[in-house]
Amino acid sequence: MDDLDLLRRMVGEAPIPDETTRARMRAGIDERMDKATGQKRRKSRSAVVAILVAAGVGVGTLAAAAGVIRHWSEGEPVAINVLPGYHGPGSFEGNSLAISDPERIVASVTTFEATVAEFAPAIRLPEEHDFTTWMLHVERVTDFLSSDGLWRRFNVAGSMVFVAECQWGQHWVDASKVGDSTGMGESIDVLGGIGAWSQSAGIDMDGYVQDVLVKQMKDGDAIALQQYLGINCGNTGSIIGSAVELDGFAQDILAQALAAARQFYDIGDTYAGFDVPEAEKTAAALAWASPDWVPSAGPGQPNIAVAEGKRLVLTGESESGAIFCIEERAGVTTYGRVAPVSGIDAHVVCEAGSWKRP
């Protein structure tokens, strides 16, 4: 049973996030990045994905003094000291991270991997998880030699803390679907500690992690938490498994999206008007994305690529990198993959494949 099966079996009515809540979820991570870097976001796919998966970029803070990296421990899920006060132009909200050479540019893949390896022991992740998936994704979408791909050491540290937030959120979801109260409790405790650290560092000034995410866990609000993870946590290594398992997860999400779309079609005998707000009325747990994000907004987000008359095209990306699609045209359903020629400015082509989910 996957996460969506769990949500379908929950007792009671699923609350649908209002527009204000959803807007906050979508904009929260980008806002944290913008405050620290002052950089404008672009709409190219690589830049958008980089923002989402490296959402800690720019949220970290600096330290003029060198810091020794310690190993995380019980009660201290992030073992990076926070220095109060201004310690350079990159300081955030008056606080800094006690790491050596925080402003040093990470100008190569080798240096990036070495920096991740340096900070990894200080940040607690769930068992069997690591930073590999996130690290490899950043390498795929980043030109370390260009100004566009500018990373500094404090960016890497802040991003890794955000990756940990995502992984512990997913760990709670995974534990909840099998009734693992110990795993659920561990997730609450660790994520609460990460949230407290983020506040003390000046990264999460509004207390979103503790006041929203941890509260959702304590309240058993899997739907809201799953939507947050879907919007913000693609390519962070939160979902683990073989390529086949990862593809199956993406396909399951698309199958659920199709079921929601068909409910809309059954009412008016048309897909016209099936947009994100309408989709959320039927399937609130899914992190829906609009055609602006075609061919993919990232793993975990079903895209409504086309919705007109008797034609519907849904797309969704797997953590493996494959982009799957479902197309309905005059009653004929195609389960396939998005053709390479598809894009934001190109017609979406769903090439027939060999997968199908009930």
Image: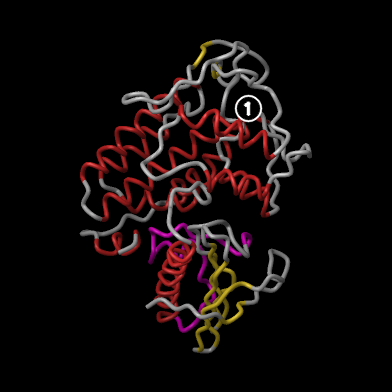
On screen, 348 above or below 241?
A: below
Can residue 87 be found in the magenta stretch?
A: no
**Number of numbered tags placed on the structure image:** 1
Quarter holding the N terminus? bottom left
Splitting the image into 4 quarters, where does residue 255 fall?
bottom left
The picture places residue 283, in percent across and down from the top left corner, at 39, 64
On screen, 274 above or below 145?
A: below
Q: Which range is magenta?
A: 268-293
The picture places residue 23, in percent across and down from the top left corner, at 50, 47
Q: Residue at x 50, y 22 (%)?
A: 202
Q: Residue at x 52, y 35 (%)?
A: 160
Quarter holding the C terminus? bottom left
On screen, 189 above or below 99?
A: below
Please indicate whether residue 130 sits to the left or right of residue 30 in the image. Answer: left
Q: Amino acid at mark 1?
A: Arg
Residues 240 and 40: in front is: 240
Please indicate whether residue 51 sits to the left or right of residue 189 in the image. Answer: right
The picture places residue 171, in percent across and down from the top left corner, at 35, 46
- Tag 1 secondary structure: helix
Can residue 274 be found in the magenta stretch?
A: yes
Splitting the image into 4 quarters, where does residue 113 fall?
top right
> Residue at the right extreme?
146
Q: Residue at x 58, y 43 (%)?
A: 135
Residue indicated by mark 1 = 153
The picture places residue 47, in percent across and down from the top left corner, at 67, 48
- Label 1: how many Cα within 10 Å (few below 14, some 14–19, many 20+): many
Splitting the image into 4 quarters, where does residue 191 fall?
top left
Please indicate whether residue 299 sits to the left or right of residue 137 in the image. Answer: left
Describe the colour scheme in one phrase.
secondary structure
Q: Residue at x 48, y 17 (%)?
A: 81
